[in-house]
Image (cartoon, grey):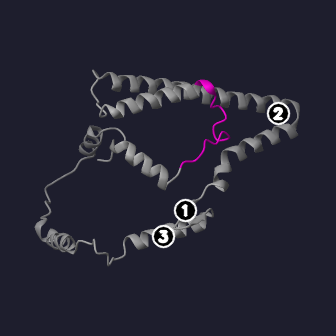
Amino acid sequence: MLCDVLTGAAGTCIGQRSFQSHFKPYWESGLREYHKQMRHNRSQWCLAGRPRNKTNTECMSFKAAKRDFRRAHRKAASEHMMQLNREIDESVEMNTNDFWKQVNTRRMAYNCNMSTSGIKFGEIVYRDQKAITEQWGFYFERLYSPSNSEHFDSKWRDHVSQNLGQLPEALIPDSNATVMPEDIERCIRSCPKGKAP
């Protein structure tokens, strides 16, 4: 199937990171089982052609498994945060040194991905924020620079340029048209959640 081919190619080209337990220390065996069930149901749903109707059993079982996993994940994360806060509260009452040790350990645990992760541009992995920003600048500069590629479609560029050149002449502003905030709000509310208008 096409999904399997694309997933295999992505795994070969991009690679997969191993699970790093220090990012999610609350990830225990119960949550792992929910995740495994959700992934299994998703693969069954994908094999069935990703139907979206409510009468399809693969779709509904995937949605139910996803809902169960998310509920268990939220519960585990919440319990973990409550446990950390309880430990900090207990240590602040007992010893200031233990308190700051736990606070700093927690801060380092959540910020450790900043020092270990990076972005690969070409064959070099950049971890410095300034270098990453600079490399993104180079990337977009190359992206928007004219190309001498054999696959470049100059006919399409000429067509688009011609239409853009005619656009100011074709548009006639209407001085009587008014756009009210209510109209804009109604348009925005008519869009699906999380989608751009």
Name which of mark 1 and mark 2 comes first in the sequence. Answer: 2
180 to the left or right of 113: left
Q: Nearer the viewer, residue 153 or 67?
A: 153
Q: Position of residue 3 (x, y in %)?
A: 36, 43
Whether label 2 touches label 3, CB < 8 Å? no
Asked which quadrant contains residue 32, the reply is top right
> What residue type is disc 2 on?
Val
Task: Inspect the image, locate mark 3, and give the three-letter code of the amino acid beneath it.
Answer: Gly
Q: In the rendered structure, find residue 144 and report the number of the disc placed on it.
A: none
Label 2 vs label 3: CA separation? Answer: 46 Å
The local secondary structure at tag 2 comes to helix
Q: Are marks 3 and 1 in contact (CB under 8 Å)?
A: no
Left-right relation of 153 to 16:
left
Q: Secondary structure at mark 3?
A: helix
| Residue bearing mark 3 | 137
Reading the image, the residue beneath label 2 is 92
Q: How many C-alpha atoms fall within 10 Å of the one at disc 3: few (<14), some, or many (≥20)?
A: few
For the record, the magenta segment spans: 16-30
Q: At 38% across and 47% down in the image, what residue appears?
A: 5
Q: Is residue 102 magenta?
A: no
Determine which residue is flagged by label 1.
Answer: 120
Decide: is 129 above or below 89: below
